Structure formats: C-alpha cells, structure tokens
Image (cartoon, rainbow, N blue to C red):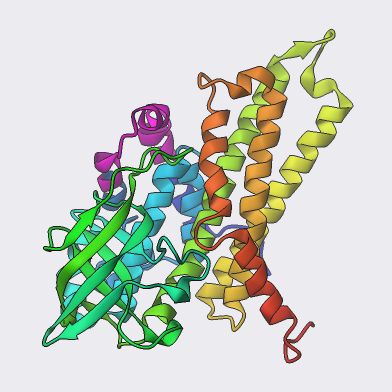
Amino acid sequence: MNFELNEEQLAIKAMIKQFANEEMHPHAATWDEQHFFPIDTLRKLAQLGLAGIYVRQASGGSGLSRVDAAIIFEELARACPSTSAYLSVHNMVAWMIDIYADDTLREKYLPQLVKMDSFASYCLTEPSSGSDAAALKTTARREGDHYILNGSKSFISGGSTSDVYACMVRTGEAGSKGISCILVEKGTPGLSFGKAEKKLGWHSQCTTMVYFEDCRVPVSNRLGDEGQGFKIALSGLNGGRINIAACSLGGAAECLAKTRDYLHERSQFGQHLHEFQSIQFKFADMATQLEASRLMVYRGASAIDNKHPEAAMLCAMAKRFATDAGFAICNDALQLFGGYGYLQDYPIERYFRDLRVHQILEGTNEIMRVIMAKRLLDENFNMG
C-alpha cells in the first residue's frame, strides 16, 4: 500500500496544473459569465491526450489508468469544474465506444473523438426516469437495417453542441434487459434539441433536452448486443462517478487554498482571522474532509483499474462522500469569506454553484446509498 504518487503521476499532475493555470484559470470566470463553451481550450486538452484518457493506445487513446484520470480531473477542476465535468462526459463516451463497439464503429468515431474534432454526449436520463433509469421510455424499433427512435432525453451535457450522442433506448422488454445503446450523429433527420437550460452553475457547457422523432439510425451504430445497453451505461457511470468526485476534489481544494490566503490577509477585532481558534478548527476540519475524500476517490479508481468485484459499491461510496464533502467545503469557504464570498468578484461562489450539481448527477447521492446498502446488507457480502 503506497499513498504517494509515482513519478509518472507526479509529471502528469505538474503538466495538468501548468495547463490549467495558463489556459483555464484566467478565463473560467468569463466562461461562466458569458455561458461560453471553450472549444479551443478543450481541443488543446485533446492535444495533450486528454480526450481519450483511458481509451486504449491501440485505439488512439492515452491508455492511462482511472487513478491517473482522477489526478487529471482534480487539477483541471481547480480551474473550472464545469469544463472539466464536460471533459469527463466526453471521455466516458469515448471509452464506451472503445470497449463495446466493433472495429468498424470504433474506427469510424474514435479518431475524431480523441482529437476532439468531434464532441460526445451521454444520453440516459429522461423526463420521467431519472433515478429509475431502467424505466426509460425512448424506443428504438427495428426496421430492416435501421432503428427508428422516438422519445426524449433530459439534462444532456453538451446537448446541441456535441456531434455524437450515446443513447440508451428501449429495443425490447420492460426493465433493464430491454435497453440497448445506440450512437446517434448530430444532423440525423429526426434528431433535435430543446433550448439551453438556465442552470445554477455549469455555465461553460450547454445542457438541453434531446428529442427523437422517427429518427432513423443504422443498426450498425449499436454498441454491443441488443439488451446490453443498461450494462454498458452502468459500466460507464462507475468511471463517471469517480471523475465527478475528482472534480469536486479540485473545486474544494481551490476553495481551501484561497480561504487560507484570505484568513492570513483579513483582520477583525485586532487580529488576523487565522489566529482565531474557532476558525482554525473549522479550517482543519475542511482540510481533513478533503484528504479523506481524495483517499476514497483513489480507492474507487483503483478498484476499477484492478477489476475489483466490489468496484461499483466503492465508486458509489467515493462519489457520495467526495461530492458531499466537496460542496460542504465550498460552502464553509464562502462562510469564512463572509460577504465577499457571495460576490462574483471572488471565485468562491462559482465553485459553490458548480459543485452543487455533483451531488445529483451520475446518480444522486441517495441512489449511491441504495447501491451501497444493497451490497452491504447482502448476507453473502464479506464484511471483513
């Protein structure tokens, strides 16, 4: 058991930190204010190999581990959690194509995705099926060599801006076994998008409804077999949960660092804020929560890398703990900044807004508890 990053990981961390400081930090507030999707910055990230982080090298990706990815997303999110979170979604879809597509489909889409000449979105949630994802209603009716899609998806990151949509659709019976995963290209007749949603945070990426009206898609665009879609969706979400937890680490770490600086600068009642014992206690608790969260995220990431039989549960634990702690740290930082923390002239409120949704997406933290409890209360589960 080694709690230190290896030389390669330290080099990755340093490279990403430098990129984030030079290419993202100076612009993140403007992206947020203007609701600007930073395509050029994302393509620069792709040049560093970050559009296919754990896509296999043989498929044109970087072939890095999930622990490496967690390190990367934490550093990027210190600059902009919103943009980092979109990059996570893109990587999730690229990985799904790499693992589950046939050679023809892989060669068709991955070269553009790993360079971010094309952008990708993940489409599972629907207006009537959020946490109960297996109850989705979007249908794909087979007609010769094509599927005819009808239905809608909601809360889609990259909606209308992405080029490829990995869609979970119903090709068979009710429940999870009747779901398949189909790639739909932007511009396909019958595919359309709703208005850009007005959100609390995540302003640097567009979120929309996605609609299918007799949308005709080749059967060859299906990932895996019919009925395998829900399994594919969940396998992608395990990594997505680790990535979004890592984004919470980054936002919380940046707020913690900025709070420390502020506590040394600000004076009240004749002494600096960092000299008050109550504030020292608060700051120590925030730092402890951050460190505990990071360890849990690395544990979950390592479980995916090593194909641990309880990887899904460990990822759920990490996502629940780190996203709750990350938001709490941002909230505490805002409180310690006082009124200044509430102003958009200071960055704390942006991290506060961006990290709040991490407790909802990739499976709500309540669903994370359901996943954990289901395994932990199984009589066959080894409690150690």
All told, the count of numbered labels is 0
Instruction: Tell me the quadrant of the picture where the C terminus can be found.
Output: bottom right
Does any portion of residue 129 appear in the rendered image? Answer: yes
Residue 316 found in image quarter: bottom right
Is 209 drawn above or below residue 180 in the view shown? above
In the image, is residue 117 part of the stretch drawn in magenta? no
Q: Position of residue 211 (x, y in %)?
A: 26, 60
Q: Nearer the viewer, residue 119 or 302?
A: 119
Q: Position of residue 124 (x, y in %)?
A: 39, 66
> Which residue is at a point 31% across and 59% down the rendered structure image?
121
Q: Is residue 360 left or right of residue 231?
A: right
In this picture, which residue range is highlighted in magenta? 18-43
Is 334 drawn above or below residue 223 in the view shown? above
Q: Position of residue 290 (x, y in %)?
A: 68, 47
Q: Is residue 339 left or right of residue 129?
A: right
Is 147 drawn above or below residue 272 in the view shown? below
In the image, is residue 19 part of the stretch drawn in magenta? yes
